[in-house]
Image (cartoon, grey):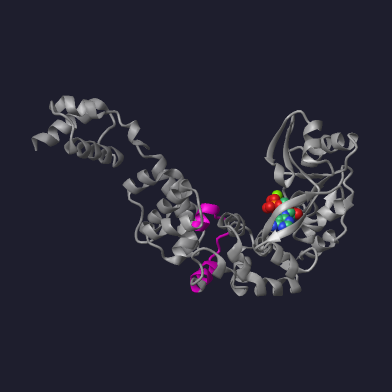
Amino acid sequence: MIDPFVAASPVLKKLEDAGFEAYFVGGSVRDFLLNREINDVDIATSATPNEVKRIFPKTVDIGIEHGTVLVLVNNGEYEITTFRTESEYQDYRRPKEVSFIRNLKEDLQRRDFTMNAIAMDRNRKLIDPFNGFSAIKERIIQTVGSPNDRFQEDALRMMRAVRFVSQLSFQIENETIQALTRLAHLLDNIAVERKRAEFEKLLIGKNKNNALKLLLDANIHSFLPDLKEQRQQLEKLIRFNSTNLNKNEMWSLLIYCLNLQQKEIELFLKEWRLALKDIREIQLVVHFLSKRLEQDWSIYDLYSAGRDHILSTEKLYQVINGNNEVESIEYWLKLYENLPIKERTEMNVTGNDVMTWFNKSGGPWLKETLLTIEENIIAGKLENDIEKIKEWLMKCNQK
Ligand code: ATP
Ligand code: MG
């Protein structure tokens, strides 16, 4: 893969050629210094959004009021954000207004943690006024300036600290931890969507169990949707080795620990503002999981669940049972792969066929008949062939 900083360098150069400063900043620089995989490179510049738009022919206004313009160039798209300060914080939330500035250091100063407040130029020279690189080397999460002030400006930063513990396996610096414990209640002021984004990153991080422990120690869970009274249930979650689970599987495991019924699952996930598509997926997996914990898969459940849900359910089943038997997962997936059909639409018979054979119009009987045919095909008792199906139906009808 081409180095993302090499690919993005012409963008910095273009800004510089037009007389502005431009740097790589934020998570990409941190991850580069940590030798971690880099997602998107973020760029900060002294050019104002309108100046950026004058320099690049193709741009999209994605957050122009915060100074961010998306620039489209042949090899990709880059978020370019104007140096800014955030002076007016209200109600412990991120500021209502930002002011654009020409000074890099001030821009770095408004960032949350020293590890996230490093800029890097085209030649990979670091501009690091807050000693972020040494924090990275020591694996320490420390606010830029007083943690008390910074958490009061924007309480979400407390959740960000904890999710970075999960993602990076860093330690939170002492004073920062103390502020976290003292100010956790300010998270009540933060929009659920922002908390969810951080919580989901926490849930899939390598060091999630330590991060969750910290979250409980600092009482942060009390200020997250529907988790206030759930200390014991969260402690149960921490005891699982859930390293390989994806986001929705982690939600499913959390729900398993919370012991929620199907109806409650929907309410819980709606409180967390999950998309309906994810809610449905999680509900299905939890449904199959609770069955699976009672007994082996039936052929019909394998068929209704489908490959992805079987896989998720099996992964969770193994996490809950504390084992890691790849063969067992493969066994169920193979049974699924060998099913004669995977979807209702693959049946070689239609409602019209059945109505013609019996010379009857539709009704509940038809639905029932089609379902019986489907079940028998899946069970391997009936071949998926229109003539065979007709013959079989006529015989059943005589009986
Ligand atoms: P990730 O790799 O998960 O994207 P990130 O550090 O890049 O982590 P982003 O949410 O993408 O996180 O934010 C980009 C940068 O913006 C951060 O590195 C940090 O410098 C700054 N930042 C983000 N959120 C805040 C905040 N609430 N307060 C101050 N600075 C922030
Ligand atoms: Mg980022």
Residue situated in front as seen by the camera: 250 or 115: 115
> Which SS does the magenta portion mostly show?
helix
Q: Where the N terminus falls, by quadrant?
A: top right
246 in the magenta segment: yes
**What residue appears at the point 34 percent right and 59 percent down from the top-left corner?**
295
| Residue 194 in view of the camera | yes
| x and y percentages locating residue 328 in the rendered image | 45, 53
**What residue appears at the point 60 percent right and 69 percent down from the top-left corner?**
220
84 in the magenta segment: no
Residue situated in front as seen by the camera: 332 or 23: 23
Q: Is residue 356 left or right of residue 307?
A: left
| Residue 39 in view of the camera | no
Q: Is residue 248 left or right of residue 33?
A: left
| x and y percentages locating residue 161 in the rendered image | 69, 63
| x and y percentages locating residue 112 in the rendered image | 74, 59
Q: Which residues are magenta?
A: 232-251
**What residue appears at the point 76 percent right and 28 percent down from the top-left corner?**
57
**What residue appears at the point 84 percent right and 62 percent down from the top-left corner?**
134
| x and y percentages locating residue 6 in the rendered image | 82, 38
Q: Is residue 138 left or right of residue 165?
A: right
